[in-house]
């Protein structure tokens, strides 16, 4: 296992472990609120920002983050405008993100190879700046979730009750959207824009199978994600596979095992 001693693999492992905490935690809140498609939407918009970053010669993840944050604000605005059809906001912003990405791809055909690493993930190419960004995002997300866990819990399970109790629902909705945008922008180079929703949703799906409480769900999503990240990186490194895709397929495999195990348990019971 010589790969464990290489610097690029150690950076990949650190980045993967950090995102393996924040990604599934944000995904759990999104899934419980039936907003899991927001992850896909912000990922597509973030890719448009990455493409623009390459085009103008600015750090791509930073531009992707700006785009994702702008999209998170826009989604909240549109959700208010279309209260009865809130999912329209997600569809509209996703369409705009795809259109912008396509436009920037066309304007800068020469960087298509570089952008592909952000589409499908390129965790082995993480540099020190990437780790600093990922680490900063991890700290911000964990601190804010810890400080506001009670309010977010109430908002997640009964938004109307939260509003009646005087909770600033608009503020917390916006905070969740911004935190999701931060996590997606930081994750995009690890698993890629096309696979990021798997990191957000599949651990949460596993928790819905096994958890009996919200606290258990929090532990399960993190454990499942970290197992997939560590095992996926090792498997991909040894057999020269795409690490992002390997991590996602392992997440799906874990979910299938848990579903099969629950079915067998019910049958035997």
Image (spheres, rainbow, N blue to C red):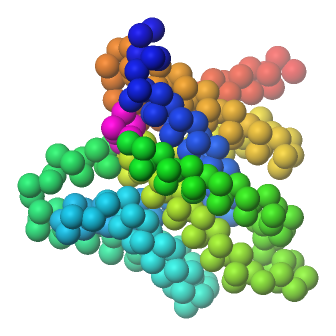
Residues in magenta, as a range: 121-126
For this orientation, the residue located farthest to the top is: 1
Return the x and y of residue 120 as percentages of the image width and height: 33, 43
Q: Nearer the viewer, residue 2 or 220?
A: 2
On screen, 60 above or below 260?
below
- Side of 95 where 200 appears, left or right: right
- Side of 183 where 48 appears, left or right: left
Q: Nearer the viewer, residue 266 or 9?
A: 9
Return the x and y of residue 196 as percentages of the image width and height: 46, 49
Return the x and y of residue 94 as percentages of the image width and height: 39, 69
- Side of 98 where 199 appears, left or right: right
- Side of 236 where 80 appears, left or right: right
The quarter of the picture where the C terminus appears is top right
Return the x and y of residue 73 as percentages of the image width and height: 52, 80
On screen, 210 above or below 80?
above
On screen, 202 above or below 230?
below
For this orientation, the residue located farthest to the bottom is: 81
- Residue at 77% x, 35% y: name it: 210
Q: Would you say residue 88 is visible in this rendering?
A: no
**How many labels, in total?**
0
Q: Quadrant of residue 227?
A: top right
Q: Would you say residue 111 is visible in this rendering?
A: yes
- Residue at 32% x, 19% y: name it: 240
Does 122 appear in magenta? Answer: yes
Does 123 appear in magenta? Answer: yes
- Residue at 69% x, 83% y: name it: 170
The quarter of the picture where the N terminus appears is top left
């Amino acid at each position: 296992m010589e790969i464990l001693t290489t610097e690029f693999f150690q950076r990949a492992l650190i980045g993967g472990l950090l995102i393996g905490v924040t990604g599934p935690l944000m995904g759990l809140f999104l899934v419980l609120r039936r907003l899991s498609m927001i992850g896909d939407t912000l990922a597509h918009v973030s890719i448009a920002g990455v493409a623009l970053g390459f085009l103008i010669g600015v750090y791509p993840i930073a531009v992707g983050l700006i785009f994702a944050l702008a999209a998170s604000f826009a989604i909240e605005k549109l959700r208010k405008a279309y209260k009865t059809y809130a999912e329209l906001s997600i569809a509209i912003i996703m369409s705009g993100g795809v259109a912008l990405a396509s436009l920037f791809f066309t304007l800068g055909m020469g960087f298509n190879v570089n952008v592909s690493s952000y589409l499908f993930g390129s965790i082995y190419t993480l540099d020190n700046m990437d780790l600093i960004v990922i680490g900063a995002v991890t700290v911000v997300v964990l601190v804010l979730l810890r400080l506001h866990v009670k309010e977010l819990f109430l908002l997640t399970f009964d938004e109307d009750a939260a509003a009646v109790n005087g909770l600033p629902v608009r503020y917390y909705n916006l905070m969740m959207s911004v935190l999701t945008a931060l996590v997606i922008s930081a994750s995009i180079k690890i698993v890629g824009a096309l696979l990021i929703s798997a990191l957000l949703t599949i651990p949460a799906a596993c928790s819905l199978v096994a958890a009996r409480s919200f606290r258990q769900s929090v532990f399960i999503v993190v454990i499942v994600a970290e197992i997939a990240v560590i095992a996926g990186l090792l498997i991909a490194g040894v057999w020269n596979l795409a690490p992002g895709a390997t991590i996602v397929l392992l997440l799906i495999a874990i979910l299938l095992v848990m579903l099969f195990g629950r079915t067998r348990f019910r049958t035997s019971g």
